[in-house]
Structures are given as C-alpha cells and as structure tokens.
Image: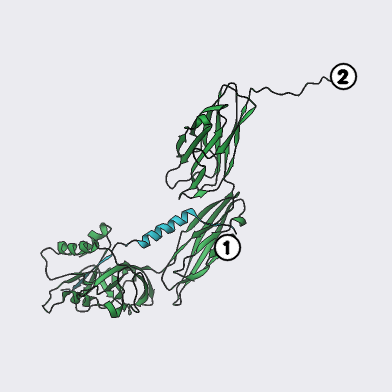
Amino acid sequence: MDALASEYANAAKSVVFLEQHVDFPMGKRIARWWAAYNSTAPAYLPLVMVDSGHRISSGSQNDFKATYRALVDAELARPAQGEIEAYTRRVGSRMRVYARLRNAAGTALSVSGNDAALHALVWEDAHVGVTNRIVRAAPWVGIYPDVAPQGEFTATLETSDLPGVNWNALHTVVVADCLPGPGPAYDMLQGALAEPAALAADPQTVTLAFDANTLEDRAVPVRLVGPYVLNWTAVADVPWIAVTPDSGSISVQPALEVRSGMLSPGWQQGVVTFSASSEDGMSFAQTIAVSAFSGPRVVRVGTATAARGSTVSVPVEFSALGDESTASFSLAFDPAVLSSPSVSLGADAGAAVLTTDTSQAAGGHVAASLGLPAGRTFDQGKLQLVVVSFSVASEAPGQATEIIWADQPVTRQITGVTGGALTATYLDGAVLLADAPIVRAPRRRIAPGGR
Amino acid sequence: MRALRLSALPLATVLLAGAAAGQTAARLVVFEDFMRPT
C-alpha cells in the first residue's frame, strides 16, 4: 500500500490511502465494507474498500498492487458528485473539522432517505500497524435535514482526545457518502483534504488605472475563503476605496469599489483589511493592497514638417496608463496632399504585432491595429506606437494639412488585457508644408533720428 | 450617478473561479484498508 501511495502521489493523482486496525475500527467506516460485502460467508483479511465500498476486495491476492490499482483507477475515472471544502484546527488534544458540502448528485441527501453522512478521517503518517499511515479518528455526522441537489450542508466534526499523536503528521480527509440505489453498497460522492483553518482573500493585490478625462468608478470582486463558521468585516485605510458589503458571513463575497473622483493625479496606494472570526474562537486577518493610477489616456497624432515632393513621417503617440494591450485606429488625410501611406511600429511598441490597412488610401484613410501577446500591457508613460509615412505632393496647396482620427476602415478602440474597451482622448495632428511661401512682415527702414 | 464598471483583471479571476465551481470537480479517491498487524 505504501508503494501504491507513492506511485499515485508521484503521478499527482488525488488518492488517499488509509489503514485501520480491523479489530478496533474508527467511526463507521468498516460498516461500509460489510454493507458492500453483503454476505454471511467469511471474509479474509485484508478488507479493502475504495470510495466507501463502491468497490471492495478481500483476502490474499496474487498481485496486490495490480488488484488495488485497478480498483483505484476505476474510481478515478468517475466524476465527483459533490464539492467539499474542509478545514481543520487543533483544539486542545482534539481535532476540530469544519466542512461544507455542495450536493452535486442528482438526488437529495438525507440520513433518513439514503443514510447520507459526512465523515472526517483523521490519520497520522506513522508506522503503527502495517503501513506508514494509520487512522486515528473518524467522527461522522448524518446529513440532516435533507439537502436538495445543488444545496449545501455544513457541519463541524470533532475527534475525541488524541493522546500521543504527532500533530505535525496528522491529516484529515472529509468524505460524503450515501446509499445511492436499491443495492446495499454505499458510494462516496466526493472527498477533500482539509486545510489548516485560515482566511484567504483573492486577489491579494489590485492595480487599476483610471482615465482622468472620463472618470469611471470600478468594482473589483473579492473572493473570501475560509471555514464556514467565519464572519468578516472590512476596513479600508483610504477614503477612495469602499467595500460593499463591508461585513458578512464567509459565504458573502464583497467587492472593492474605487471612487475615481476621489483619486489624486498619479499613483496612490490603499490597503483593505478583512478581519474574520468565529464564535468558537478563531480569528484571522487578510489584506488586499490596492494601487490606483489616475491620469489622462491620450492618443495623439504628431505634427511633422516636410517639403513638397518629399516624404514625411508622422508619429502616433500614446500616453498609456499601463493597462492597455491593444490599440486600433484609422487616420484620415487629404489625398490631394498626402499619399502612399505606410505604417511601421514605433520605438516603444515593444512586442506588439502590427496590422495595417491601406485599402482606402486613395480615399484618404489608413488604419493600424497593434496587439500585444496575451496578458501583456503597454508600459505606462508616453509611447511612440507607430510611425506613418506619406509622400507629399509636389504641388500641394496651403501651408499645412491635417491628419485626423477617423473610424474607417477600422473603428478606433483601445482594450485592456481581458478585451474590455478603455476610454481615451484622441488628438489630431498635421503636416506643415515647409516650402510654402513664407509671409514676412514688410521691412521698415528706420532712418537715423527715428524717421 | 456615475456608471460602475467591473474591473478587468479581477473579474477574470472571478470568472475563472466561477467556471471551476460550475464544473464537475475531479474525484478524490479514498482507499481504506482494514488489517490486523501480525
């Protein structure tokens, strides 16, 4: 059994191997074996069961490992019929276990209807019997009242005193089982390894950027996880963060709301502290660090000077807040003055992939789209995204020609890492025609004496 | 009243967690062996 345990652990498969003394069994686990055996014929040791008796074996085997591996693999292939979240806590010389079960079986669970129960199998990694693990306690509770499909059941289980155990080597698996059908054998819905009781908050850090030109509040969902008996309260240390709701049971999930109108320009930091406690004496705290940046998100077409008959390069600059991952836009220009547009990546575009569309160049439109690899964002600050080059007509009239934002052939859009559209301010640019007739003020000759 | 927008990154985290919760979780198998040490 120890060899099999290592084999499954090395393969990262979720299998728990447990030994009990057949003459001093804990809880009502061995009754599950006898229920599945369902015979008055003598049974020979060892008595083995997988998943509360859904599969059993007994007696000597030609190849123990192969027989037991077949039992385990058949069970691994089945879907779970419940979800269990479990936590443990040492109270004196007892282990207290907090369990939450969600019923994903297609039927209601109840002690009266199908003898449904929740068991906490507490074992020690120690060579006491035959193997390197021994069950020290197996408290259980019948599921009552009925738990409908998709319903939840919570329970606190506690062992009797566990003298002489190495508490650092104690582990707990919580399992839910029931009689699934007319047959005598029980089946396990699901099992879950219990974790030391604690409060966890996800995410642990939040970084948000706000376009100062179009302020918009944000809500960041928070996931609080811990023993079902916990109740929590939240406090933010800055006025621009509100937590809604600001208290509740552990099953109530709050959101952090960032009030954009209360932000100062630039970076600012805040901390939200969640404090959780239970009536039976647990107390935990977790913090979420919030960083918020407020500044204008601006995309600007540059201004360049060019001689008629030459080429001109016009940069497109981006004041990025650092949460953007794509930028798409179209520029409109006077095709009588500018022609043959070509777009190249700018100096600060990083790993962005550039796609251009010059199909409407004759009509005075050019489009570009930049996309960063998944999960990446543009650096915060002023970036040169692309450079657009044009030929300048040799007979171009006027002193300047505008390059303005357009939404043809590509609609302007900036998106964040998850694809959500982000606001921005778009500023037009121009090409100044350098060899245009220069209008000078008439010279005045001033005679000595001011005449 | 200003519009309240769900933030991009953490929302993704929650959606992932939600998807995980909605799916059938992998089974944890418990193998129990009743023996008599000799």
Q: Which chain is green?
A: A
Q: Chain of mark 2?
A: A
For badge 2, the amino acid type reads Pro
Q: Nearer the viewer, residue A405 or A310?
A: A405
Q: Which residue is mark 2?
A: A448
Q: Chain of mark 1?
A: A
* Alpha-carbon span between mark 2 and mark 1: 75 Å
Q: Which residue is mark 1?
A: A237
**In the image, residue A382 lies at what x, y percent?**
56, 41
Q: Chain B hue?
A: cyan
**In the image, residue A446 lies at what x, y percent?**
84, 20
Figure colour scheme: by chain
Mark 2 residue crowding within 10 angstroms, few (<14) / some (14–19) / many (20+): few
Q: Is residue A106 left or right of residue A347?
A: left
Mark 1 residue crowding within 10 angstroms, few (<14) / some (14–19) / many (20+): few
Tell me the residue at 53%/27% (across/down): A339
